[in-house]
Image: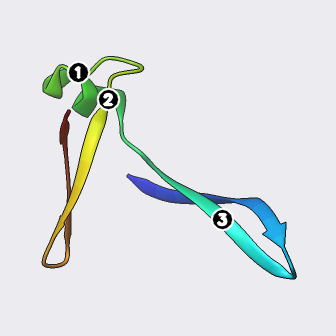
Amino acid sequence: MRLLSQKHSEYKGKKYEKFWVVIPSKIIGKLGWKRGQDLEAKVKEDKLIIVKD
């Protein structure tokens, strides 16, 4: 997997970025997730947990 980012906007000299994680299709298939599905993210200690909403 890979963490990617892109410049989102700039306001009063401060730059803002968007981030996303690329998850391989094989993993998405195993999870049974579908395109456009709502997901919920939680942080537990130093881990990111993503679940179907």
Nearest the viewer among 14 and 7 is 14
Q: Is residue 7 left or right of residue 39?
A: right
Q: Residue at x 36, y 41 (%)?
A: 23
Under mark 3, the amino acid is Glu
Image location (x, y in percent) of residue 27:
23, 33
Nearest the viewer among 52 and 1 is 52
Q: Point out the tag, 2 or 3, that comes first from the N-terminus.
A: 3
Under mark 2, the amino acid is Asp
Q: Measure the C-alpha gap from mark 2 to mark 3.
A: 21 Å
Q: Measure the C-alpha gap from mark 1 to mark 2.
A: 16 Å
Classify residue 46 by image quadrant.
Answer: bottom left
In this view, 9 is above or below 51: below
Residue mark closest to the camera, 3 vs 1: 3
How busy is the neighbourhood of tag 3: few (under 14 within 10 Å), some, or many (20 plus)? few
| Circle 1: element type | helix
How busy is the neighbourhood of tag 2: few (under 14 within 10 Å), some, or many (20 plus)? few
In the picture, the disc for residue 38 is 2
Q: Is residue 31 left or right of residue 1?
A: left
Image location (x, y in percent) of residue 42:
20, 58
Image location (x, y in percent) of residue 20:
49, 51
| Circle 2: element type | loop
Under mark 1, the amino acid is Gly
Q: Residue at x 38, y 52 (%)?
A: 1
The answer to whether the residue labelled 3 contacts the one labelled 1, judged by CB atoms less than 8 Å apart, is no
Image location (x, y in percent) of residue 51:
17, 40
| Circle 3: element type | strand
Q: Is residue 6 left or right of residue 46?
A: right
Q: Quadrant of the C terminus?
A: top left
In the picture, the disc for residue 17 is 3
Q: Point out the tag, 3 or 1, that comes first from the N-terminus.
A: 3
Residue indicated by mark 1: 29
Q: Point out the tag, 1 or 2, that comes first from the N-terminus.
A: 1
